[in-house]
Amino acid sequence: MSNTGATANPTLDPNLKSWAPGANDEGTEFPIQNLPWCVFARKADAHIGRHTHEDGSVHEHSHINPLFGVAIGTGILDLHMLLEAGELESVFDDEEMNAISHAFEDTCLNSLAELGPAVTSKLRRAASEYLREGGTSGGGGQQARRLRTKVIVPMNEALLLPPMHVGNYTDFYASMHHATNVGAMFRPDNALLPNYKHVPIGYHGRASSLVVSGNDIRRPKGQQSPPEDGSSGPVFGPCKMLDYELEVGAFIGRGNEMGEPIGIADARQYIFGFCLLNDWSARDIQKWEYQPLGPFLAKNFASSISPFVVSLEALEPFRCEGSVRPAGDPEPMAYLNDKTDRASGGFDVTLEVLIATAKMREAKVAPSRVSIGNLKDLYWTFSQFVAHHTVNGCNLQPGDLLGSGTVSGADPASRGCLLELTWDGIDPATKKPKPRKPVQLPGGETRTFLQDGDEVIFRAWCERPGFRRIGFGECRGVILAAK
Amino acid sequence: MSNTGATANPTLDPNLKSWAPGANDEGTEFPIQNLPWCVFARKADAHIGRHTHEDGSVHEHSHINPLFGVAIGTGILDLHMLLEAGELESVFDDEEMNAISHAFEDTCLNSLAELGPAVTSKLRRAASEYLREGGTSGGGGQQARRLRTKVIVPMNEALLLPPMHVGNYTDFYASMHHATNVGAMFRPDNALLPNYKHVPIGYHGRASSLVVSGNDIRRPKGQQSPPEDGSSGPVFGPCKMLDYELEVGAFIGRGNEMGEPIGIADARQYIFGFCLLNDWSARDIQKWEYQPLGPFLAKNFASSISPFVVSLEALEPFRCEGSVRPAGDPEPMAYLNDKTDRASGGFDVTLEVLIATAKMREAKVAPSRVSIGNLKDLYWTFSQFVAHHTVNGCNLQPGDLLGSGTVSGADPASRGCLLELTWDGIDPATKKPKPRKPVQLPGGETRTFLQDGDEVIFRAWCERPGFRRIGFGECRGVILAAK
């Protein structure tokens, strides 16, 4: 592994320490080397009210002032306050300062991300300089001290908001293990389709129903296949095979013009950062509806994203060198083949899924891990997603979300959804699937698919000797009963 | 056929005449009974410039002031000017007036459409009252006459802009004839899948690459299947099977909250109006990429929409009574089954596709019709699209576009894309597809798929004895060579 790119960037220096609370703790997700972007409101300023009218109708209203921040230790650095205090003026020229001030009027990070990596890297570096021990926050005596006490908002005093407005959401299918496992259920003799190793398979998802971590997820209703005994036609009701899908999403920063493909070597310049993504899936609805045009209602009722956007820079030390594809596999076509740098490698990010049932939460039992995997197991890279998505001239726009697809590895313990985790293969005698093997949870509970009240929690982190641990924060959602 | 709904609405009275130029002409698409919404700029006010910098780089800039209008005769009624002249004040109460003034600050019709049919119907009626002979435009003497001369913008002095900002684009597959024809190419023994008559099949399209009629379409490049002789792997290059797809799109007005399905009987209240939609398709790219998750790069390079939004009200006289599905077919499930009103019927809209090649345009030969069909041939209705899309809790938002899918009828002359039109079936001897049968064009030209320079033109209209003819305007696009 080469760390050239990493060590060239002083914000990644593992010896950097910050004066911000909790930032130097061993286990923190948010050391000064991470600084993931977020949008938040100060709870003290947020006004969320309910008003009952004379006719009995209830009106909910909220006044929220969205602020941009970077997570640090146990809090968030308020970039708006930093800007207003004049702390960024020495870093940017007038033109950049105007652009940033304008971007800070947006309610999400789209306008900032659109300024491209030259500006956002500089802003990240300025935040790092301000936060580091012995950095720029020290000058100015009493006034500077006063700013330091106010500019870090403790996590429990912050309301985390959607970081980006997602105009278009595309979901890829980049884990060959996932594609093979799922393919085997539907096509036992032909699990992996002939296009898989040539085409980064993707499809369009629903942007309107993306919600940020912490939002409850209502169990969907829908059509399901006719019973196997043929006693009736298709049936309608609440989904009985509700599942999560463990994914990582990339947010687009700058976009491209329609008709102008993005070359593979430039692709990383268009990625603003990464989040965790839960592409909730109704497997019984999916099975009945998905042919011939792909999943629709099985997916578009909701997808959840984590509130923090981890930058490419923070992940730089955790790149894997060399191609992600096994020796002997076909070479990617030229437009997908980056031989010039480490973009052809994946990222070494550990991914964990936990479940906490309602009973477990009541009994104050900690969430239980159901799988652990790694992002480096993907067959295709995010740079390849960008190059492929635009090779036909399709335009990406700031805030667009590119999902990895479910991340599963070769190890059965790393399977990124219950559809795969509880699959027990085909019975050779009957040629039919064996009964599903439920996941075991504390207190004797088991799950084949999700039950009402279950909370699903995704976590992700990077660790490597010689570097600080980088965390992604959490992506959570509790299942509500169907209406 | 019952016309109760139609005649109850005075704006549809076939005897209404307008003082606006061309509105009473026999063949006009835009009589006073139509009044489709649009967004436009006055060319005289629009400033579009090119500036060459010293370093040779070219900077394009434009200052366009988007205005809302309704098409009438040979022009567009400028609703902004009508509003500013105070002509709407007697129609709306203060609250509505505030909402409309606010909506008119938007650059597209989303905010207006979001106000719902109660407000937009009133606005449509006010426009009708102003435009009709003997209507409200007559009062006020000289000032009123002056307004009348300025408030209608001739079409050739208007720049037509995208009518809505489309946040989410969903494409359905509602023509059983299309599904059967295409299915037969891929699965000769199993053309129509078992879910088709139960599920209004749909999938998510790409919103970012939607363009308004008149924009050129760049031929996409992409991966295509390996040659049949197996001499190589998949190949890369410009699409060789470029196609159009004739569709009608519905724009959502008001949206629904996540988790709150829209009932079939209410569905029409959520539809703002209709446009023509060309879902350009790269068939060779599609064939290689579409399994298992559906079309992606084959579709998302561009889709074109017509600039006029024809309201549900204008189409009211052209509803067909009774269910669209043949006797003996399964009943739609309850959430898709509207027995209470005529929403179960389709719309009688004639749909025409024309092609003008570069050679034809040069020789001043008129565009040549390649197909003519009818919207009533759809197996599923737009109300069913809305009910199905939201039954799982998925939220629709103002400006969302729901495409019908390619509209083909039983008559081969009504097939809505070249993939179907030039298909000649399977050779019973070889069990392989027969060579495609090209479409004949004037001057001896033929087309199996689209060539560079071809212009594709969609037109649509409604005609019924006792009613004025209603037109949709055109949806046009010229194919540019791949880069």
Image (cartoon, coloured by chain):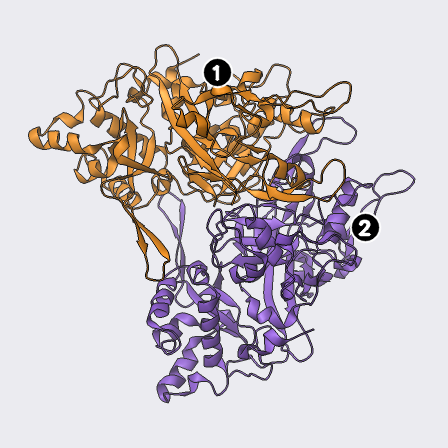
Chain colours: A orange, B purple
Please, which residue is most extreme toward the top here? A465
Tell me the distance, in whole angstroms, between the alpha carbons under discs 1 and 2: 52 Å
Q: Can residue B338 be seen in this view?
A: yes
**What percent of the width, then of the height, locates residue A235?**
67, 43
**What percent of the width, then of the height, locates residue A284?**
63, 36
Which amino acid, by three-letter code, is at mark 1?
Glu
Q: Which of the 4 image quarters holds residue B233?
A: top right
Q: Mark 2 points at which residue?
A: B437
For image coordinates 75% across by 50% down, the residue present is B420
Q: Which of the 4 image quarters holds residue A350?
A: top left
Quadrant of the drawing holding the C terminus of chain B:
top right
Q: Which of marks 1 and 2 is in front?
A: 1
Quadrant of the drawing holding the N terminus of chain B:
bottom right
Q: Which of the 4 image quarters holds residue A410?
A: top right
**What percent of the width, then of the height, locates residue B424?**
83, 49
In terms of secondary structure, where does tag 1 sit? Answer: loop
| Crowding near the residue tagged with mark 2, few <14, some 14–19, many ≥20 C-alpha atoms within 10 Å | some
* In-image side of B383 versus B66 (left or right): right
Taking B381 as reference, is B317 above or below it? below
Which amino acid, by three-letter code, is at mark 2?
Lys
| Crowding near the residue tagged with mark 1, few <14, some 14–19, many ≥20 C-alpha atoms within 10 Å | some
For image coordinates 59% across by 78% down, the residue present is B7
In terms of secondary structure, where does tag 2 sit? Answer: loop
Q: Mark 1 points at which residue?
A: A321
